[in-house]
Image: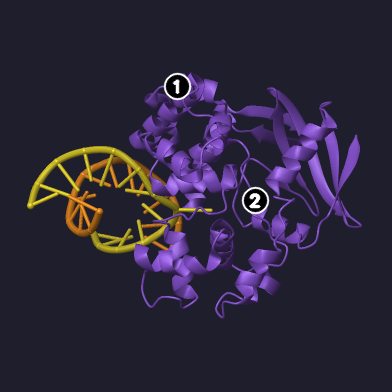
Chain colours: A purple, B yellow, C orange
DNA sequence: CACCAGGTATGGC
DNA sequence: GCCATACATGGT
């Protein structure tokens, strides 16, 4: 089964693939020569999709499963943030003498999302305060054991573990994978909050961004950085800024916006010029840190 | 052997 | 509210 999505202005499939392929060993998608494959769960049923590009269309091929077409289209649109109009963002970038190169260099790069809120929160917990290579290793070990596995044409595809599975784990289950005690506690506690229904994407969607941040930060293990990261990547709340983010600070420092690591106040004043596009600005700043291939 | 990595909780003032 | 510190572990 194959269908297509028209490619809008200011969308570059290649830029998006580039970001997904940043030299990290991400177990949740597979970059091929000119396509990306991903296992998604639709009501717990594994669906394997392949996304490529042809003549101003994204081509989606269902390699396994028989899902409703619209569900898959909606997933891809959300993952690649396809329906966003970037005109205003590029206008703002253009006005910044240190960042305006991004309009041409990264043109068409979209904020790649993590549509599953539980996965987004877990991933940001895993990534706290450790280097990204190790974080991807932890995610892979965790997913290989507790996630959904699907074999197809000599490759293995994975979907992130469900909250139901994680909520039943004990800290000791995760320690051999080299999770710290704290990370293990945090992940299990967050899973329980999802199982109990205290947190869900639907619930947070009803809240303002400030309310959603407060709600998330009440959970042990979720601080300001994690809450903003999750809302940015999962709910696409574009006004989120990952305060406390070392990567963000380094990016701003490297672009000579600040002679040393900026304070919170300096960050706030920097973002005044990117009102309503803060998350996209953060995302492009992260992009600027990536090592050129 | 230090110091850092896409932080957070905790306790002291 | 703002600061220091512990937390764990791999990479450089």
The residue nearer to you, when weighing A281 against A17, is A281
Q: Which mark is residue A230?
A: none
Q: Is residue A193 left or right of residue A158?
A: left
Q: Secondary structure at mark 2?
A: loop
Can marks 2 and 1 be said to lie on one chain? yes
For the N terminus of chain A, the image quarter is top right
Residue holding disc 2: A112
Q: Point out the residue furthest to the bottom here.
A: A97
A181 lies above or below A226: above
A24 lies above or below A27: below
Q: Residue at x 64, y 54 (%)?
A: A111
Position of residue A28 measured from the top left corner of the image (x, y, whole percent)? 64, 40
Q: Chain of mark 1?
A: A
Q: Can see residue A21?
A: no
- Within 10 Å of disc 2 (Cα), the crowding (few <14, some 14-19, many 20+) is many
Residue holding disc 1: A169
Q: Chain of mark 2?
A: A
Q: Can see residue A118?
A: yes
Position of residue A95 measured from the top left corner of the image (x, y, whole percent)? 60, 77
Q: Is residue A229 left or right of residue A4?
A: left
Q: CA distance from mark 2 to mark 1?
A: 29 Å
């Amino acid at each position: 089964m194959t269908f297509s999505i028209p490619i809008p202005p200011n969308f570059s499939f290649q830029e998006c693939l580039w970001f997904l392929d940043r030299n990290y060993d991400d177990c949740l998608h597979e970059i091929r020569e000119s396509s990306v494959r991903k296992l998604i769960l639709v009501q717990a049923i594994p669906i394997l999709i392949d996304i490529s590009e042809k003549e101003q269309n994204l081509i989606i091929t269902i390699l396994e499963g028989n899902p409703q077409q619209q569900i898959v289209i909606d997933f891809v649109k959300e993952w690649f943030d396809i329906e966003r109009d970037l005109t205003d963002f590029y206008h703002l970038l253009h006005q910044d003498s240190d960042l305006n190169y991004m309009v041409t260099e990264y043109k068409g790069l979209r904020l790649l999302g993590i549509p599953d809120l539980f996965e987004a929160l877990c991933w940001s917990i895993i990534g706290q305060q450790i280097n990204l290579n190790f974080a991807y290793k932890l995610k892979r070990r965790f997913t290989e054991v507790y996630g959904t596995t699907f074999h197809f044409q000599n490759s293995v595809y994975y979907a992130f573990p469900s909250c139901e599975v994680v909520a039943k784990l004990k800290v000791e289950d995760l320690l051999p994978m080299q999770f710290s005690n704290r990370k293990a506690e945090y992940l299990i506690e967050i899973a329980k909050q999802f199982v109990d229904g205290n947190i869900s994407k639907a619930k947070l969607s009803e809240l303002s961004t400030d309310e959603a941040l407060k709600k998330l930060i009440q959970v042990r293990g979720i601080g300001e950085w994690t809450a903003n990261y999750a809302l940015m990547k999962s709910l696409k709340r574009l006004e989120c800024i990952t305060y406390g983010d070392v990567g963000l600070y380094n990016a701003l420092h490297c672009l000579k916006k600040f002679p040393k690591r900026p304070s919170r106040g300096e960050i706030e004043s920097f973002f005044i010029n990117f009102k309503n596009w803060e998350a996209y600005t953060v995302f492009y700043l992260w992009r600027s840190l990536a090592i050129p291939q």
